[in-house]
Image (spheres, rainbow, N blue to C red):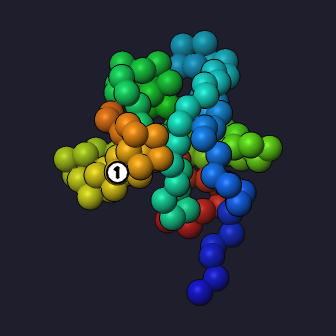
Amino acid sequence: MARPPGPKVSGPREAQYLYLTTTGRRTGRPREIEIWFTRRDDRLYLVAEHRERAQWVRNLRALPRVNVRVGKRSFPATARLIDARSEHELARAVKALSERKYGWGNGLVVELTPAGTKS
């Protein structure tokens, strides 16, 4: 079965981090952070160590449209906070991926869906 169209988010060797640009909820200005990520299916996942206290999480809660840069590729995406109570299996799987990649995976899981990716 053909993979749905959407940006290629990694090359042959998975990058260690990505750059996430949110829009400041108060200033309206772009705010960029460097952050570890994992990939599952057509989505990218972040783990916010400081959960809802992280400024970037507060920004994307206010405006979930973000820009993502992985290596030389840049693309728009939509962010979604994963509720571990209602999406326990997904949260657990993402945390396990992060544990394998970085040796750490505790925090709030955030899903990034690249524009053009089918639901």
The answer, for residue 3, to whether it is visible in the render is yes
In percent of width and height, residue 89 lies at: 26, 58
Which residue is painted at 56% across and 67% down in the image? Answer: 118
Q: Nearer the viewer, residue 39 or 57?
A: 39
Q: Residue at x 69, y 43 (%)?
A: 70
Q: At 63% across and 21% down in the image, what residue appears? A: 31
Q: Nearer the viewer, residue 52 or 15?
A: 15
The answer to whether residue 37 is left or right of residue 48 is right
Residue 66 visible from this viewpoint = no
Q: Quadrant of the N terminus?
A: bottom right
From the viewer's perspective, is residue 28 above or below residue 75? Answer: above
Q: In the figure, 100 relative to 8: above or below?
A: above
Instruction: Give the SS element for disc 1.
Output: helix
What percent of the width, then of the height, locates residue 68? 66, 40
Circle count? 1
Residue 100, horizontal then vertical, whole percent? 41, 49
Q: Position of residue 30 (x, y in %)?
A: 67, 22
Residue lying furthest left: 85
Q: Amino acid at mark 1?
A: Ala
**Relative horizontal placement of residue 29, taking residue 65 as reference (left or right):** right
What residue is shown with label 1? Answer: 96
Which residue is painted at 61% across and 28% down in the image? Answer: 34
